[in-house]
Amino acid sequence: MSKTPVWALVPAAGVGKRMAADRPKQYLPLGDCTVLKHTLQRLMASQLYAGIVVALSPEDEYWPSLCLSDTEQVYRVAGGRERADSVLSGLDFIALLGSVDDWVMVHDAARPCVTETDLRRLVEEVGNDPVGGILALPVHDTLKDVESNRIQSTVDRSRVWRALTPQMFRLGLLRDALREASRNDRRVTDEASAIELKGLRPLIVEGRPDNIKITRPEDLPLASYYLEQQRCE
Ligand code: C5P
């Protein structure tokens, strides 16, 4: 395993419109606490990180209720308008404490079911890679390319994977890539996209299907079920 420090960076500054809830989705109850607290507990329990940086909305009023504010290892920074802005803000903060060659694992606040096995596998498999890499899942459904509700073609699913988080890249490379994407007005929805725009090819590490992202109301009971199942493993 790489001896280079690894930082966790958790973008948690979104509003989660598709949940149509009274608060941002990362603060919705899940089991005995909130989505964000589960996510942070998973990261903290792994003891893999030099520090965990959480990007929060400047208007966030829920953070103190997590009772994590005084935890030494967790730092909070102000997030931005888009996810990529929140990640950049976290990277700028990590740059003050670490070096450009440090690894940064970016993990969505909205993925509370990530397992320690997956976190460790990513560090082991990506830790010596020149580019970096991400957890992803092969696609099993037949995929259609659609325009105006009409199928244009069938996509070759053997080449298609679903990008998950965490995504792990060197601090310097990721910061350059995200800054460049922003300068060129390229909207990126994950870290790998920014690295790809630089002409680089991130590594794929197969993750677990229960590492779901809470997006719609029906995802909460599903996450709760997965957390319960994982307790029995
Ligand atoms: O909206 P979506 O599910 O794609 O968001 C993924 C993650 O990015 C969430 O954890 C969300 O809180 C975070 N995010 C952020 N800053 C934004 C928008 C989203 O940190 N401006």
Image (spheres, grey):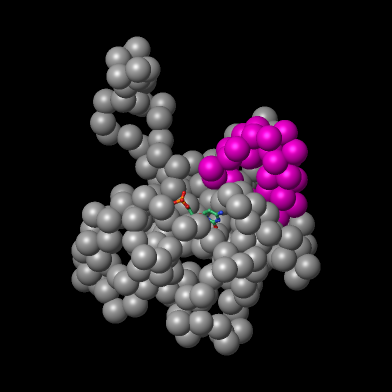
Q: Which x, y percent locates residue 5?
A: 66, 66
Give the residue drawn at x 72%, y 33%: 184
Give the residue drawn at x 47%, y 85%: 67
Give the residue drawn at x 36%, y 26%: 158
Q: Which x, y percent locates residue 165?
A: 47, 52
In this rendering, the answer to whether 85 lies above or below 36 is above
Quick one: 172 or 23, which is closer to the camera? 23
Q: Is residue 145 magenta?
A: no
In this rendering, the answer to whether 37 lies above or below 134 is below
Give the residue drawn at x 63%, y 39%: 194
Relative to residue 46, is residue 55 drawn left or right? right
The answer to whether any part of residue 159 appears in the image is yes
Q: Which x, y percent locates residue 12?
A: 52, 62
Q: Is residue 174 magenta?
A: yes
Residue 4: quarter of image: bottom right
- Total tally of numbered discs in the picture: 0
Q: Residue furthest top?
A: 152
Quadrant including the N terminus: bottom right
Quick one: 68 or 125, which is closer to the camera? 68
Magenta extent? 168-197
Q: Main secondary structure of the magenta part?
A: helix
Quick one: 170 or 126, which is closer to the camera? 170
Quadrant including the C terminus: bottom left
Q: Which x, y percent locates residue 171?
A: 70, 55
